[in-house]
Amino acid sequence: MTFPNVRLRRLRTSSAVRDLVRETLLTPADFIYPLFVVHGRGVRNEIASMPGVFHLSVDQLAAESRELVSLGVRAVVLFGLPAVKDAVGSENFAADGIVQQAIRVIKDAAPELVVVTDVCMCEYTDHGHCGIVRAGQVINDETLNVLQQVVVSHAAAGADIVAPSGMMDGMVRAIRQALDGEQFSNVSILSYAVKYASSFYGPFRDAAQSPPQFGDRHSYQMDPANAREAMREAQLDVEEGADMLMVKPALAYLDVIHRVRERFDLPLAAYNVSGEYSMVKAASANGWVDEHKIVLELLTGIKRAGADMILTYHAKDAARWLND
Ligand code: PBG
């Protein structure tokens, strides 16, 4: 059967028919909204390179959480900016660290909101690397001990999901062991399993004040040219006990999202990262693209590629547009 018997335009004749046959549905419940938490009171400072995204102090988080819930966004991912940075990133695992405080306030204000914490060292260390540094090298296995302390402190504060993003070998296994050893076996691990050494993180490094002070991240984050290696990264994390996988960034890696989706049955997240966000905001501010339409098209594309959930700075705007 072919034309003229087959006419694909028949299923595009009205908006109602198009709604019936649509394959990919985007909803606010797909989104995980990143929050950047800072010390101080009454702080709500817009991040210059990420219009519409703010540094928030802890006292702002109750209202922010309730707003997210009212929009239908059900999850946040927390990043903290510590008061002081040092070689091991001490505030990262302090009981009263900025993220630990934030978790408690959010869980108090909106208990139903899922709290995911980013687990990494770069925001907390004076050298800006995602691990312990010795003689200019990032030392893998010693870093695991620190990550274990971090996840236990996040779990103790009430985090639902911990998301290790430092691309250390064995991080998922070490974290699972630490959580289970402290009776946090209900806390899930969302592994940044496939994370590329990407230039799309530029604006985030402003937001988190976390650029490496020497060198780059190529000895731990993946080469953007590799997709088979992504399968090995995901496989290892599955074997180590990850509950969910992530691919990051999203837009230049839709093929990788698709491949991970085909190969693994774990829930899959994609991170629509800072550079992807800022490019859309800049083009929209210039009137070169229609922000509303382009954002929903991009997020739909990420979901169509195979992501079940999307970490995105567009979450609040996209939720409003979807709710309209
Ligand atoms: C921490 C971390 C980074 C991002 C999320 N977690 C920065 C990096 O790896 O350099 C990037 C997020 C974004 O760009 O939106 N390791």
Image: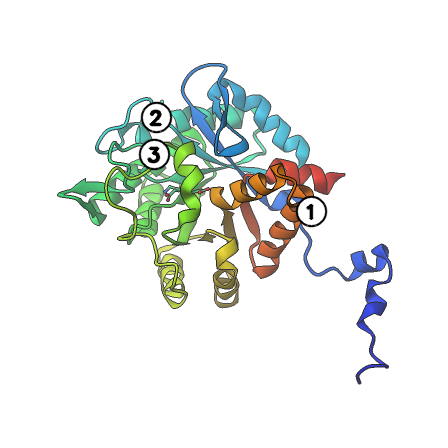
Amino acid type, callout 3: Glu
Q: Position of residue 77 (x, y in %)?
A: 48, 37
Amino acid type, callout 1: Lys
Quarter of the picture holding the N terminus:
bottom right
- Residue 189 visible: no
Look at 71% across and 40% down and name the residue there. Answer: 321
Q: Is residue 287 left or right of residue 215?
A: right
Q: Which residue is labeled 1 in the image?
A: 293
Look at 56% across and 22% down and name the residue there. Answer: 62
Q: Is residue 272 left or right of residue 209?
A: right
Q: Which mark is residue 78?
A: none
Q: Is mark 3 within 8 Å of ligand 1?
A: yes
Which residue is at the front of the view, 317 or 216?
Answer: 216
Q: Residues within 10 Å of mark 2 (few under 14, many from 20)?
A: many
Q: Is residue 69 left or right of residue 42?
A: right
Cβ atoms at labels 2 and 3 below 8 Å apart: yes
Q: Position of residue 241 (x, y in %)?
A: 39, 54
Quarter of the picture holding the C terminus:
top right
Q: Position of residue 101 (x, y in %)?
A: 42, 23
Q: Which residue is labeled 2 in the image?
A: 82
| First along the sequence among labels 1 and 3 | 3
* 184 in relation to 83, above or below: below
Q: CA distance from mark 1 to mark 3?
A: 33 Å
Which residue is at the front of the view, 121 or 296?
Answer: 296
Amino acid type, callout 2: Pro
Q: Is residue 233 left or right of residue 63?
A: left
